[in-house]
Image: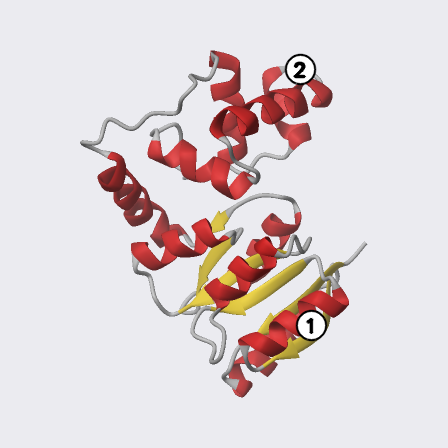
Amino acid sequence: MSIRIVLGDDHAMLREGLVALLRHEPDIEVLGQAGHGLELLRLARELRPDVVVADVAMPHVSGIEVARRMRSELLPSKVLCLSVSAQPAQVTEALEAGASGYVLKENCFEELARAIRHAFGNQVFLSAELVAPVMSAYRAAGGGQGTSMPPPLTWREREVVQLFAEGCSTQQVAKRLHISAKTVATHRAHVFRKLNIGSLAELTRCAVKQGMTSLD
């Protein structure tokens, strides 16, 4: 089954170049492309792709705002933000808006393809050079305030959180912990309820804040 995507970027040459490359990937199907955020939102609503790739700096509606609006409308697509900016504050804003990943434009095309596959698999993806500064920003924001994850997680729940944050699927977590996928899903539901969150992206943010994963 192909991963169905739409892509938005206001630079036509870059956008069309990415679309041409993506069409050579046997497991990725490009449904459409947009030159600004409002058009990208329209495509996301009409086509319901698996993944929306959104340039952060699009006119009318930014890629981050696209993610925010899609989450508020409960649209099923995952959102990947694409940007030239490596500012931790912007990456954090994208994740908090509901994005499943953040890819730097300076990196090779293969990284974007990998990020799309991660998002489709309910995994969070960050370009490698973003991990350390984003972690530092999270810890700086939470450090000194005595923040924690109330109510406390059990040791097994913390193991599940760590593995999901490191990009494991439900089946991979089950295999690593020698438990059933159903049990993993139950632990995940308990964690979501305890932390008052609703996505793996939010779960990853909590894990980073608590130093439970390095995301290497």
The numbered dot on residue 43 is 1
Q: Position of residue 180 (x, y in %)?
A: 71, 18
Q: Secondary structure at mark 1?
A: helix
> Is 190 situated above or below 71?
above
Question: In percent of the image, x 66 and y 15: which residue is there?
Answer: 179
| Circles 2 and 1: CB atoms closer than 8 Å | no
Q: In the depicted view, which residue is nearer to us: 104 or 93?
A: 93
Going 49% across and 65% down the picture, which residue do you hit? 65
Residue at image location 57% in from the left, 38% down from the top: 198
Marker disc for residue 164: none
Q: Does residue 134 appear to the left or right of 172 in the view shown?
A: left
The residue indicated by pointer 2 is: 179
Q: Residue at x 52, y 46 (%)?
A: 124
Q: Amino acid at mark 2?
A: Ile
For the C terminus, the image quarter is top left
Residue 128 can be seen in this image: yes
**CA separation, marks 2 and 1?**
40 Å
Where residue 113 sits: x, y (%)?
59, 60
* Image side of residue 1 versus residue 162, left or right: right
Q: Secondary structure at mark 2?
A: loop
Position above or below: 46 against 168: below
Mark 1 residue type: Leu
Q: Is residue 143 left or right of residue 32?
A: left
Nearer the camera: disc 2 or disc 1: 1
Q: Can residue 20 be spotted in the picture?
A: no
**Mark before the other along the chain sequence, 2 or 1:** 1
Front residue of 47 and 216: 47
**Mark 2, residues whose alpha carbon is within 10 Å: few (<14), some, or many (≥20)?**
few
Instruction: Name the quadrant containing residue 70.
Output: bottom right
Q: Residue furthest left?
A: 144
